[in-house]
Image (cartoon, grey):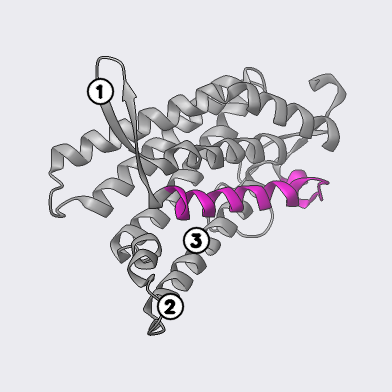
Amino acid sequence: MAGDLSRIDGQAGARRSFRYFDFMMAAFVTILLLSNVIGAGKVAVVSLPWIGPWPFGAGVLFFPVSYVLGDVLTEVYGYAHARRCIWAGFAAMLFMAFMSWVVVALPPAADWGNQAAYEAVFGQVPRIVFASIAAFWAGEFVNSYVMAKMKIWTGGRMLWTRTIGSTIFGEGVDSALFYPLAFLGATGWTAKLVITVALTQWGIKTLWEAVLTPVTYAIVGFLKRREGVDVFDTDTDFSPFRIGGAGATGR
């Protein structure tokens, strides 16, 4: 496949318009929001052999898909385009949190008896909301940075090494930030429990990424063939705060 593609650097990729990029960004933001609203609202349980019932946040089944799409965005379109998607997701999560707060705070009609259930799903504690947004932002940027750098180091070969490798670091930062920021010191949450849950979630999400490797290969292959280019971030400014083009630093 690589022989049929035009290799371009990060600056050229940042200036280029792509056929399927908007669809990928929409999918990224959609999965991000839904996994935080629908998935985070339920604690599920699965019965494991020799272990017994094992509770887990239902969002863990779908939130890692946003990392898969983040890998695809960086691999196919380059860091600059992935950065735009991360900021779009960040803004969408802020708006979702603000909208949830406003709607929950509105006085319910006297004959509407679902306020308690509505608050249980959408009335997340501000501390948890802040932790979720901060962890997403940092984790996704680490994931994209590692993905882009490993692509250069491997010469674009062995895609699986950078999808899994970037997830180890990205999900690691996500879990290391979210659980202490959200629960450390809260009632019932000891430091040991926070560390245990963070490590468990990190392991599950990383394993999920590895399981989805064939899907990642299929999506990357399809998009690269349709777009006709292979972006290498050899001259990219990796600052999260550069909103324009890729820049030229070579860092």
Q: Main secondary structure of the magenta part?
A: helix
Position of residue 106 relative to residue 67, above or below, is: below
Which numbered disc flags the more N-terminal residue, 2 or 3? Answer: 3
Element class at badge 1: strand
Residue that carries the numbered disc 1 in the rendered image: 52
Is there any visible trace of residue 144 in the rendered image? no
Q: How far apart are marks 1 and 2 (CA)?
A: 41 Å
Position of residue 84 relative to residue 234, above or below, is: below
The amino acid type of the residue labelled 3 equals Met
Q: Give the range drawn in magenta.
A: 11-39
Query: Quadrant location of the C terminus?
Result: top right
- Residue 102: give its label: 2
- Residue 187 position, x and y percent, is 13, 54
Residue 109 found in image quarter:
bottom left
- Between 26 and 162, the one nearer to me in the picture: 26
Are discs 1 and 2 less than 8 Å apart at CB? no
Element class at badge 2: helix
Q: Nearer the viewer, mark 3 or mark 1?
A: 1
- Between 206 and 10, the one nearer to me in the picture: 206
Residue that carries the numbered disc 3 in the rendered image: 93
In the rendered structure, the answer to whether residue 105 lies left or right of residue 67 reads: left
Position of residue 36 relative to residue 164, above or below, is: below
- Badge 2 density bin: few <14, some 14–19, many ≥20, Cα 10 Å: few
- Between 207 and 15, the one nearer to me in the picture: 207
Q: Which of marks 2 and 3 is in front?
A: 2
Residue at (60%, 52%) from the top-left corner? 30
